[in-house]
Image (cartoon, rainbow, N blue to C red):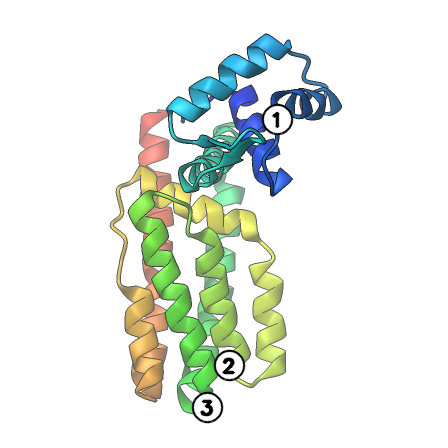
């Protein structure tokens, strides 16, 4: 997947963002040098003008540039593209029956654990837990609108349910699985490649938990994980066919 901005442009956006105050051309050039990126002052000036014209940066009085919301979003999108490209290369290099079995094994473990954590959460979730789940879903929906990765929100949603289950052993078991963050990103990448639509699984699970419907919460979580498994197998079959 191609980056919209080049490497130096992204690095300059990061420098301005991390400054947390207006920063001038000379200071930006020094920061680039610290990163072993050697460019002339004139080049930095031209890039700053381009980023400003693209609404990623703006001048603040005579003190330098500050980053705009569009600039912050550009950084997030660039980081997401880097992650996707990395995983795409890894899939191309190492995809095998062993890798497929690894995905399925993780999903099988998740299904067993999360059916129970979801049932328990539906029985005893706190008001704070409900608020947190809804905030995660709202944040996830906003990111979907802007094309940002929602892998972090997906992890946080499931981790919150595990925490609200009140069973520390099940929570610990889920947290072991959730450390496979790369898999969450890979799931997201695979689903995008097979055009699997963004589902309403999380909001439906949330509503079941909110209504203290243990059976429905457990059923919906099982279906959610089964759908992930289906997407992995669909991607696998598509990949295999394209490489015969």
Q: Residues within 10 Å of mark 1 (few under 14, many from 20)?
A: some
Task: Report if the CB atoms under discs 3 and 1 are less than 8 Å apart.
Answer: no
Front in this rendered view, residue 216 or 64: 64
Residue appearing at x 40%, y 68% in the figure: 135
Point out residue 88 in the picture as x, y percentages from the top left corner.
46, 32
Which quarter shows the C terminus? top left
Q: Element type at marker 1?
A: loop
Front in this rendered view, residue 74 or 3: 74
Q: Which residue is mark 2?
A: 164
Point out residue 188 in the picture as x, y percentages from the top left corner.
40, 47
Marks 2 and 1, how far apart at CA: 48 Å
Q: Element type at marker 2?
A: helix
Point out residue 51 in the picture as x, y percentages from the top left corner.
45, 24
Residue 37 lies left or right of residue 232; in this view the side is: right
Where is 207 relative to 7, above or below? below
Q: Residues within 10 Å of mark 2 (few under 14, many from 20)?
A: many
- Residue furthest out toward the right: 34
Front in this rendered view, residue 41 or 71: 41
Q: Which residue is mark 1?
A: 24
Task: Report if the CB atoms under discs 3 and 2 are less than 8 Å apart.
Answer: yes
Mark sitting on residue 234: none
Mark sitting on residue 124: 3
Q: Quadrant of residue 218?
A: bottom left
Residue 51 lies left or right of residue 45; in this view the side is: left
Q: Element type at marker 3?
A: helix
């Amino acid at each position: 997947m191609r980056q919209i901005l080049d490497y130096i442009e992204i690095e300059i956006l990061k420098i301005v963002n991390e400054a947390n105050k207006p920063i001038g051309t000379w200071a930006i050039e020094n920061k680039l040098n610290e990163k072993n990126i050697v460019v002339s002052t004139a080049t930095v000036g031209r890039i700053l003008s381009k980023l400003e014209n693209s609404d990623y940066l703006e001048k603040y009085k005579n003190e330098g540039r500050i980053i705009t919301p569009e600039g912050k979003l550009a950084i997030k999108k660039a980081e997401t593209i880097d992650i996707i490209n990395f995983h795409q290369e890894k899939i191309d290099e190492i995809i095998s029956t062993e890798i497929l079995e690894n995905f399925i094994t993780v999903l099988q473990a998740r299904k067993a654990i999360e059916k129970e954590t979801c049932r328990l959460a539906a029985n005893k979730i706190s008001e704070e837990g409900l608020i947190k789940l809804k905030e995660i879903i709202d944040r996830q929906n906003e990111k979907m609108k802007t094309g940002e990765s929602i892998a972090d929100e997906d992890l946080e949603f499931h981790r919150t349910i595990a925490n609200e289950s009140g069973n520390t052993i099940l929570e610990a078991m889920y947290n072991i699985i959730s450390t496979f963050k790369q898999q969450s990103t890979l799931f997201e990448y695979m689903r995008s490649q097979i055009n699997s639509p963004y589902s309403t699984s999380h909001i439906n699970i949330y509503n079941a938990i909110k209504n203290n419907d243990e059976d429905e919460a457990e059923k919906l979580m099982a279906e959610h994980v089964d759908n992930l498994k289906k997407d992995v197998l669909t991607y696998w079959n598509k990949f295999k066919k394209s490489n015969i």
